[in-house]
Amino acid sequence: MCVQMFTVLEVTTLKARLGFSSIAGTALTLAAGIIAAMPAQAQRPGAPPPPRVMVATFQSAEPGTGVQFAEALRVRLGRDANARDLTVIPKADIENTLKASGYSTTEALGPNDAKALASLIRAKDYIDGSVTRTPAGFRVEARLVLARDNTVAQALPAAEATRLDQAAQAISRSYLEARKQIEHEERCYNALRGGNAEQAIQHANTGLRQHPDANMVRVCLANAYVTRDTPQDSATVISATTLQLVEQVLATDPRNIQALRLAALGYKAAGNEDKYVETLTGLLAAAPTDLTLQQQVVNELAASGRAALAAPIIKEALSRSSGDPSMLRTAWLVLLAARDFEAAIPVGRDLIVADTAQATANFYSRLAGALSGLNRSAEAVTILNTATARFPNDASLWVAYAEAQRKSGNTAEAVRAGQRALTIDPTAAEPYVILATIYGDANQADSVYAVLIRAPSGGSNSALIAQLALQQGNNAYRAGNTSRNRADFQRAVRFLELSNRLSQSNAAQFLLGASAFSIGQSATTEASTSRSCELARLAQQSFVTARANVPAGREEFPEPTNQLLEALPQFETPVAQMVRQFCR
């Protein structure tokens, strides 16, 4: 069997458009009629028909060049190959099938469509690639691809020539040499399908001895090693030998999808983060229209903090398939993950024109976030105004709307949107966070506290609210250090106690202790002159709180922790005496 890292998502292919299913459609019937009318090739009586090869239209920036080269290659292959060993499918047969299927005969096909066409016209393998104009003539990059599985391929040496027919001669020679490995790859593949990994290894090694550059055979050998080395129902095992094999493939064919998948698994298992990320970006470049693969790669790159590496690759891929919804969606996700908002915004807008089903609440929220990230808050407000009208019961959109209004300086509208989100989903933490942030901006500490104290606790909610309370407490503590106003420290204590109650942390505990110490210090000074029992007791209680919480800062804040712990005894004894004197 062939080990794969990702599950390939079914996409629209030529077969699907032809109605290639249990109930054959008109287009399929017509195409089948065309194929049945093809002239039979001359062959020995009783001998099996020779394998058939399809030459697909090559990619080219110059109109007509890809078609011209494909025909030049067919002509050259017809001269170079023995008709009894190989049939080159004529241009007319390919074009008739494409026309019957509603496809252009002058444009290059995508990977899945090329595979479907090759299967439909009974090609064993096919050749595709690209033609580029150079100052000296042309550069052709081509691949031999199996119709059975278009991830099984052999990159042919690039050809450069002054004329297309000269380049075709070089590609023809390389192809005929490369296809000699196919019989060995098939033996290896069939043995794997039959569950015999050892036999597959033997077939592959025989093929490599005869054809050392046979990458299709080398990949099959790597898959055979994986099958042999991986225990049943366990994670895929990529040995050092397997990894070395696929690295040999990638050295000459960096777009080999199967080799990239195996290499990614190997590097991840080995903890080689840099090589793992590099391989993921290679997969992104090699299969830019495989949605499932793209999504996995995007997620992996984002998790690794390296999404920016994928951005230039996806931009290049998008330029080759402008307007394709699947490509636009992939580019949208990649560019967002890379925080390339300037590029992401127009791609997102093109996406919902090409595929209106993508205009979801989540899409609008992300688009507004991208606009806000570029400080285009007014545009974000406009987008979210439309979105909340379309999805009035989506709390996350109202939260995003509140954030956009906050950044635009519209406090009243921001509060209204936040309260609307809270009404829709009072169990989510985000509405409380946005309201607390809005009130915090307006220096309405009591309103912030009132919101946070109502927030639901438990799980991630507690951690989120605790972090916000810690932030408010730290702000109040810093304000108190500047103002030396006891009320600022008391406000800090209130927030820090809430933070520590929801999710205990050393930072919250230390700041709570430090704030309490400052309250006690202030109350001691006033109590000594006013002889106030109330202030003396406040000071005593505050020092108890400080004594209990300051030590939590030993690791993160060692110097201020030691200073406070050394100062505490200097206050605790005199304050105890004040309480005895003033509170009779």
Image (cartoon, rainbow, N blue to C red):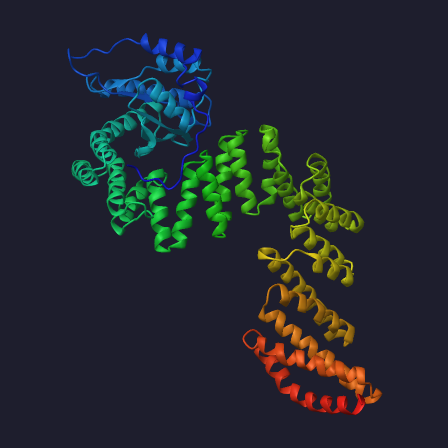
Q: Residue furthest right?
A: 530
Q: Quadrant of residue 488?
A: bottom right
- Horizontally, residue 430 falls left or right of residue 131, namely right
The mark tally for this picture is 0
- Horizontally, residue 87 falls left or right of residue 326, namely left
Q: Residue at position x 62%, y 34% from top?
A: 359
In percent of width and height, residue 320 lies at 49, 31
Q: Is residue 561 above or below residue 250?
A: below
Q: Is residue 577 above or below residue 296?
A: below
Quadrant where the image shows the C terminus: bottom right
Q: Residue at position x 65%, y 76% from top?
A: 513
In the depicted view, which residue is nearer to us: 37 or 211? 37
In percent of width and height, residue 285 lies at 43, 39
In the depicted view, which residue is nearer to us: 343 or 471? 471
Q: Is residue 73 at least partly visible in the picture? A: no
In percent of width and height, residue 245 lies at 26, 45
Q: Quadrant of residue 470?
A: bottom right
In percent of width and height, residue 297 lies at 45, 43
Q: Is residue 114 above or below residue 37?
A: below
- Horizontally, residue 380 falls left or right of residue 269, namely right
Q: Residue at position x 63%, y 58% from top?
A: 457
Quadrant where the image shows the N terminus: top left
Q: Residue at position x 78%, y 49% from top?
A: 410
Q: Is residue 284 at least partly visible in the picture? A: yes
- Horizontally, residue 398 falls left or right of residue 444, namely left
In the depicted view, which residue is nearer to us: 451 or 398? 451
Q: Quadrant of residue 328?
A: top right
